[in-house]
Image (spheres, helix red, strand yellow):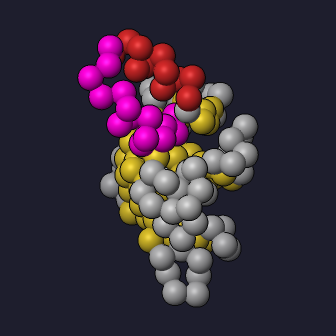
Amino acid sequence: AGAGWEEGGDTWYQEGSLAIGHTSGVIFIVPLGFLARAEGADPEEVQRRVVEQSVVLDASDGCCVCSLAWCSPDHRYITSGAIDGKLRVWDVLQPLWPIFIRSVTRGWITEMFWFNTMGYGGAVVVCTSDGRIGAWFPRTAYLTW
């Protein structure tokens, strides 16, 4: 399962959140403030409250989430990579379904991260289980290996 940290900003999702990817394909966005208050609490109670207080992203296909990355230019978006080889882009303010899905490998996505590119609006670097490294540019939907 994947996990991604995001810190800073001026809205609830930018004040600091932890994205936790699960083997079931579900992603929990947990506010860091909640985790700080949960220190020393009963682990089962913490788990129950995480599920209750998190924003939940669900690809509904049961694919294990292997990698997560927050969008560096705008922390409103997060990408997820799974064992089905698909890159998904999520809007945490409209979390019912991914806003973009693209199949990028026949294997699975092992790592990804956002980086800023001058004039291109950012890109996501994707590493796959078959040893490839690529860059996906959301503004143009272009993928290069």
**Residue at horizontal 48 percent and vertical 76 percent from the top:** 116
Placement of the N terminus among the 4 image quadrants: top left
Residue 43 vertical position relative to residue 79 in the rendered view, above or below: above
Q: Is residue 94 visible?
A: yes
**Residue at horizontal 54 percent and vertical 71 percent from the top:** 73
Horizontal side of 61 relative to 131 (left or right) equals: right
**Residue at horizontal 52 percent and vertical 56 percent from the top:** 14
Residue 140 vertical position relative to residue 10 in the rendered view, above or below: below
Residue situated furthest bottom in the rendering:
119
Magenta-colored stretch includes residue 68: no
Residue 98 vertical position relative to residue 42 in the rendered view, above or below: below
Q: How many marks?
A: 0
Residue situated furthest left in the rendering:
40
The image position of residue 79, as x and y in percent, is: 54, 52
The image position of residue 145, as x and y in percent, is: 46, 68
The image position of residue 16, as x and y in percent, is: 45, 51
Quarter occupied by residue 62: top right
Magenta-colored stretch includes residue 36: yes
**Residue at horizontal 67 percent and vertical 73 percent from the top:** 140
Q: Nearer the viewer, residue 81 or 95?
A: 95
The image position of residue 102, as x and y in percent, is: 63, 52
Horizontal side of 125 relative to 89 (left or right) equals: left
Horizontal side of 121 relative to 98 (left or right) equals: left
Q: Nearer the viewer, residue 60 or 21?
A: 21
Which residues, given as a range, are shown in magenta? 28-42
Q: Is residue 106 visible?
A: no
Q: Nearer the viewer, residue 85 or 59?
A: 59
Residue 127 vertical position relative to residue 109 in the rendered view, above or below: below
